[in-house]
Image (cartoon, grey):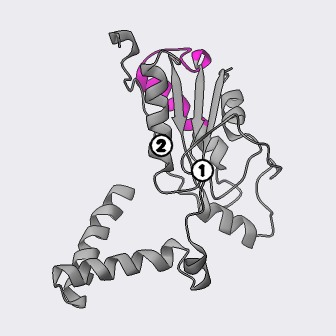
Amino acid sequence: MSERQLPIIVGVGQYTNRSDDPADALEPLEMMAKVAREAEEDAESKGLLGRLDSVGVANILSWSYGDAPGLLAEAVGAQPSDKCYTTIGATAPQWLISRTAERIAQGESRLALVAGAEAMRSMVRLTASGRRGWRRGRRWTPPEAIAGDARMGSSEIEVRHGANAPLRIYPLFENAIRAHKGWSIADHQRRLAALCERLAQVAK
């Protein structure tokens, strides 16, 4: 692999929507376009987005777009030959990063955008206000490429017993870790509280 094919990050962007008014809240597509432009600025290279040959988007749970990578490319003025969307799953974004890096290393891509966004809080507020979501509908069209594991995340037995949602599964993991370490429930709660406190500081 030549140095020209070495995968590197040239620009990054991040945005947290803090609007309490659902009418002002950005939809996921708008947030991704915003941070893509921030990444272009971070790279200090004008016109970078217009030269993208690959656009990848991590699965969006808060709203379903017909072609999220295609709509994002259109929003930033790109015409990529490769568009990829991930499956649902905690590791799916890493699958997307790995796929993108591999394509660059193999000479299949020169400049790629990897993006993701969620707007769960805004979606809940929109629904509560009587709106059904954002302007683009939920008609699904198959993406050109899929990254991630498309298998069901739960077995039939897990589904039957309600152990198919992170809200129910992760507490089981935490309790198993606690028992293995020999911690009391109170000790483990203090450890988790300290961890979540640090995570909350990052989220700010």
Is there any visible trace of residue 204 in the rendered image?
Answer: no
Q: Residue 5 location in percent, x, y?
A: 40, 15
- Check residue 167 in the rendering and tell me which mark sits there, or answer none: none
Which quarter of the figure has residue 22?
bottom right
Element under disc 1? loop
Between the C-alphas of marks 2 and 1, the distance is 9 Å
Does 120 appear above or below 47? below
Residue lying at 83% horizontally and 50% vertically, measured from the top left? 139
Does 13 appear above or below 42? below
Residue designated by label 2: 95
38 drawn magenta: yes
Q: Residue 8 location in percent, x, y?
A: 37, 24
Residue designated by label 1: 87
Q: Find the magenta span and give its range.
A: 33-51
Does 78 appear above or below 3? below
User: Badges 2 and 1: C-beta atoms under 8 Å apart?
Assistant: yes
Is there any visible trace of residue 88 in the rendered image?
Answer: yes
Which quarter of the figure has residue 151?
bottom right
Classified by dominant secondary structure, the portion drawn in magenta counts as: helix
Left or right of 119 on screen, residue 106: left
Q: Residue 199 location in percent, x, y?
A: 32, 62
Left or right of 178 on screen, residue 106: right
Does 186 appear above or below 78? below
Residue lying at 55% horizontally and 78% vertically, measured from the top left? 158
Look at the image and tell me in which quarter the N terminus lies: top left
Residue type, mark 2 in image: Trp
Residue lying at 38% horizontally and 27% vertically, measured from the top left? 9
Q: Residue 194 location in percent, x, y?
A: 24, 72
